[in-house]
Image (tube, rainbow, N blue to C red):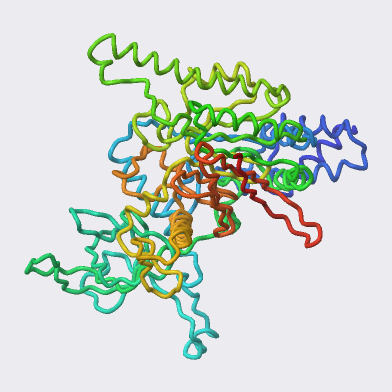
Amino acid sequence: KNTLFLRRQTLKAFKLRGLTLQSSACDAILNVLNREDKSDHNNILNTFAEDVKERTVRSSQGGNIVTQDLILEIIAEQTRDEQDYLRERLQLLNAFEMPRLNFDIMRRKFSLLNNQKKSIFGDAEDKVDMMIQRFTLVQQRVLRQECFRPKLVTSDNYRNSAKTSTSTTKITPVESLIGRSGPRNLLGMIVQVEEGRYYLEDLTGQIPLDLRDAQVLSDGLIGENSIVLVEGEMRDTDLGGGQQTSSLCLHVDKVGSPPPETREESLIHIGLQNSNIFDAFSSETELNQLEEEELKHGQDNMFVVLSDVHLDKPSVLTKLETLFEGFADMEPLPIFIFMGNFTSTPIRSGSSGSMRGGRGANQSSSNLQILAGYFDQLAKIILQYPRIAQEARFVFVPGPLDQTASAGCVLPQPPLPTFFSSRIKQKIPHAIFATNPCRIRFFTKEFVFFRQDIIGKLRQNCIIQPRSQDDDGYEDDTIMEEDEPQDKESSRKNVSDRLVDHAVQTIMDQGHLSPLPLLSSPVFWQHDHALRLYPLPDALILADNKVDQFNRICVGSDVMNPGSFALDGSFIVYTPIEVDEENSEVRSNVDFSQIE
């Protein structure tokens, strides 16, 4: 009788929430209730029912049938203890395994695509889809901004419209420009359809641009493939260059990058299910539990990030010994992130001779053996510190000149070959070989690690003088060319710092790690989503050895460069969670370090 009563109570609790329990699912819940005190039965039932209801509401599939698999999944999550969360606090996601966040323009809805078959050999449709998704993710973000959101007309604001100074800025599609006069505001991507001639393109069409008098209203480096907001009007414009002809084009008066959005704002609109790319939590309850463990144990952990770890240089190996000696007694041990390039000069497995006979093949094999020898030397150094070798976690991210499975510098880069990784994994059990870029989840935090000399490329592809630090449209000539400075070293640092500011803002505004022409930065079309930054990560480690170490906080995210370990022994120690008890604040901390 007691079991029959519990079954009725269970079915009723779910039915009140519009849910139907399968018989096997009900049995699974009864097994839990029979092990608990009677006084707790109502609370347990309500917890189960609310958790299931939350998941069905958030799920894109919907449905009100509750299966046994779903109940067992919830039971497993609710029985996780503190040690389970600590063991699973760190999770790595490689670029080729990352699910794709998709935005449906017609339904205006996000979805997370997990089971799509992807290849590095895309077709023309994949390239088009890549650009459409880049644009639509920015477009939906911009149209949600207060200044671009259409106001709902009510009797009150209609009467007071003449008294208010605020108004909505309307974004005009490219196809609506023809036959209209006067200034218009547009959102589009700058493309080069013909040599030396830039167009603004959106989902409706493209229009030639005249950027000669454009005033830049925001920080950033604007170039081909940049998504921009422009204000201008259609005019007959002289093409210049000694040509006598004129062309109808969009004369741009003002141009700027799309306004960014914080991670928290993006997550509200994307939703919990669609932002869970690591599949680490499936309910608000589990996320809250993870946040509690983060505050308790997260501040004990740190990341030691090195870039340009040239294993072929004896001086670098000596510095690594010093590094490990300094961290050997720490509790807990830090997470070591080693980013390429791992040799001072490129060593490739192939050669031009390999197509003509045995000599090239022998040279290829010899190169692989040399590279493997360098990693064996690294393993030997790590093994000098038994606790680090057995307990510490190592993540190896390849650099643009490292030997990987993909040809050239096409992004994303695969991990270093198993020929190297398998040998070091035998000796260092917690060594992980990641893609470039890769993502790491630390409790609820998301970090992106990217090794690319991207800042110089953004500068080289800039087609409009960036805005100066003095504000309001004056050209920042110091970014593009240097005058005769009184203090050359101070001037050089100011120019470099300002360039970094522009580059970081560009990456965050564009929501992409490499917003460049494909000729300058080729991308695997079906894997472009692995380079997108939407929502923005909690931290972006942007390893660029062409500029000095830096740390910026941009749109609420930490952006940092560890510097070149091979050049001057520089690296960073990143503590993602520090609790300031005095001010009741949780913040991150970056320490710039150097080994002489």
Q: Can residue 185 be seen in this view?
A: no
Residue 210 shown left or right of residue 65 in the figure: left
List x then y, in percent, for residue 127.
Answer: 32, 42
Instruction: Judge whether 525 appears above or below 559 on screen.
Output: above
Residue 5 shown left or right of residue 577 in the figure: right
Instruction: Judge whether 410 appears above or below 558 on screen.
Output: above
**Which part of the image, by quadrant, shows the C terminus?**
top right
Front residue of 305 and 249: 305
Instruction: Judge whether 124 appears above or below 208 on screen.
Output: above
**Which part of the image, by quadrant, shows the N terminus?**
top right
List x then y, in percent, for residue 513.
Answer: 45, 47
Based on the displayed image, in which of its 4 quarters is residue 524 positioned?
Answer: top left
Residue at the spot 46% in from the left edge and 49% down from the top edge: 547
Residue at the spot 38% in from the left edge and 59% down from the top edge: 221
Front residue of 363 and 242: 363
Residue 371 shown left or right of residue 67 in the figure: left
Instruction: Judge whether 334 appears above or below 158 on screen.
Output: above
Front residue of 280 and 219: 219
